[in-house]
Image (cartoon, rainbow, N blue to C red):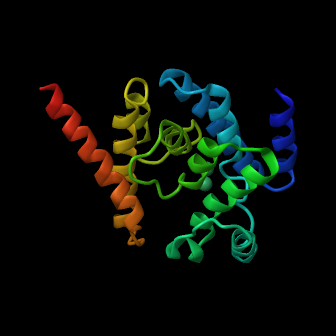
Amino acid sequence: MGELEQRILSHLQGRLSKKRLTHTLATAQTAALLASRFGYDPHKAYVTGLLHDCMREENLQNLLLFASKSDIIIRNEEKQSVSLLHAPASALLARQAFGADEEMFWAIRWHTLGKEDMTTAEKICWLADYIEPNRTHEGVEEVRQLAETDLDGALLRAMTQSLRHLRETGAPLCEQTVKAWEFLRNTMKNGAKEKS
Ligand SMILES: [Fe+2]
Ligand SMILES: [Fe+2]
């Protein structure tokens, strides 16, 4: 393990629970695997995975304060919950403390909500977080199988499942996530049309 990874790990060790640390390491490993499969830099994907939840266990007030000291734009729905706000806050810390570049920054920033026209780095981080081996949610195995060969197909399936889950549990649907899903579905439909 390199010096940067060591530094990130010692930072995380005091701040994340054992369970979250296990999830973090597994996300990093899964991201590196996906990167080598889909033509992205495995080392950058690994480091992005290590950092994606680095602020996940801070309280809402701290996250709001931290984000307010930067120029990052936070969506209104993100201001209400740690489960959303930790993404932009983690991206900020990744950049400030660990030198994350633009690709890594945005991959961490959008790993909860997703966005339209995602980059490969963003897709890999989102998907690795969803399918890492400790995840047991319904349908995860189908997504893992798709992710063997088809990054967009796996992501679309994962986002579909994730939106369905939100609907079923009565949780509010974020407009941003619905737009991400629609964009990906339309891109894939158009791609299929062009091929036929
Ligand atoms: Fe997260
Ligand atoms: Fe995560």
Q: Is residue 174 above or below residue 132?
A: below
Task: Say how many tags the image has.
Answer: 0
Q: Is residue 140 above or below residue 19?
A: above
**In this orientation, which residue lies closer to the viewer: 189 or 20?**
189
Q: Residue at x 63, y 49 (%)?
A: 105
Judge from the rendering whether residue 157 lies leftward or rightward of residue 136; answer left or right.
Answer: left
Where in the figure is residue 170, as x and y percent of width and height?
A: 38, 72
Q: Residue at x 71, y 44 (%)?
A: 100
Farthest residue toward the left?
196
Where in the figure is residue 181, as x and y percent of width and height?
A: 34, 52
Where in the figure is residue 45, as x and y percent of width and height?
A: 62, 34
Judge from the rendering whether residue 24 lies leftward or rightward of residue 135; answer left or right.
Answer: right
Q: Residue at x 52, y 28 (%)?
A: 34
Image quadrant of ligand 1? bottom right
The quadrant of the image that shows the C terminus is: top left
Q: Is residue 89 above or below residue 9?
A: below
Where in the figure is residue 8, as x and y percent of width and height?
A: 81, 43
The quadrant of the image that shows the N terminus is: top right
| Image quadrant in which you'd find residue 73 | bottom right
